[in-house]
Image (cartoon, rainbow, N blue to C red):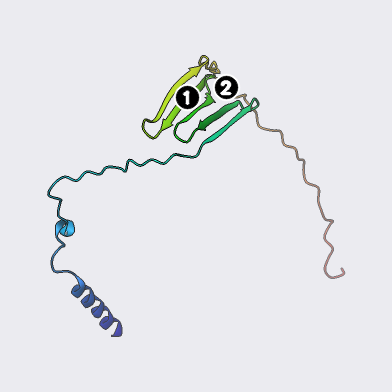
């Protein structure tokens, strides 16, 4: 009986909490009478000067890449490169500043080489292995009578 009363009270609470009408579209937002445009502030602070470079060359794994970049605080210039799987080296030379943004030139050195595909070789045929076990030897002797006969 208590469960039925509690369930009825829950349904009553949900029914009374429901709004009578759906909300208005836009929630009362009014579009501006004239178009508004945003202009980013023109103030630009000079950045920190820097100079860095790194390179990785691993003949065993076939890795060769690096990056060199420097800045006077206004203009950043740099170059990065990577050895591609086809044997060419991709080189990206770039400049970046507050007015012109990032501008890059991509070049390639070397000639693309692709390995010859290996021809299909069927898997070798294997037979069933020969059994490596013999007849098991008994691990116990003849049974002895439980009562001394």
Residue assigned mark 2: 122
Quarter in which the C terminus is drawn: bottom right
Where's residue 52, x and y in %?
56, 33
For residue 140, above or below residue 70: below
Which element is circle 2 on? Answer: loop
Between disc 1 and disc 2, the foreground one is 1
Where's residue 29, x and y in %?
17, 56
Where's residue 102, x and y in %?
40, 31
Which of these two is toward me, 125 or 85? 85
Which of these two is toward me, 58 or 16? 58
User: In the shown orientation, is residue 69 left or right of residue 132?
Assistant: left
Residue assigned mark 1: 93
Q: Which residue is at 52% across, 19% downward?
A: 88
Q: Which residue is at 13% across, 66% downward?
A: 21
Label 1 and label 2: CA atoms lie apart by 48 Å
Q: Which mark is residue 22?
A: none
Category of crowding for the residue at label 1, using alpha-carbon neighbours closer than 10 angstroms: few (below 14), some (14–19), many (at least 20): some
Q: Which residue is at 23% across, 79% downward?
A: 8
For residue 7, above or below residue 93: below
First reached walking from the N terminus: tag 1 or tag 2 = 1
Q: Which residue is at 53% across, 15% downward?
A: 110
Quarter of the rendering containing residue 25: bottom left
Where's residue 126, x and y in %?
64, 27
For residue 64, above or below residue 16: above
Most extreme residue toward the bottom, as rendered?
1
Which element is circle 1 on? Answer: strand
């Amino acid at each position: 009986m208590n469960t039925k009363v509690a369930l009825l009270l829950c349904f009553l609470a949900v029914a009374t909490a429901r709004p009578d009408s759906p909300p208005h579209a836009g929630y009362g937002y009014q579009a501006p009478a004239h178009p508004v445009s945003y202009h980013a502030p023109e103030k630009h602070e000079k950045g920190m000067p820097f100079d860095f470079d790194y390179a990785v060359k691993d003949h065993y794994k076939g890795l060769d890449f690096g990056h060199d970049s420097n800045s006077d605080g206004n203009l950043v210039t740099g170059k990065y490169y990577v050895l591609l799987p086809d044997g060419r080296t991709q080189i990206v030379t770039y400049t970046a500043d507050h007015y012109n943004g990032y501008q890059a030139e991509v070049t390639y050195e070397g000639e693309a080489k692709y390995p010859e595909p290996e021809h299909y070789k069927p898997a070798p045929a294997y037979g069933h292995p020969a059994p490596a076990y013999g007849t098991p030897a008994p691990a116990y002797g003849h049974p002895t009578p439980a009562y001394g006969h």
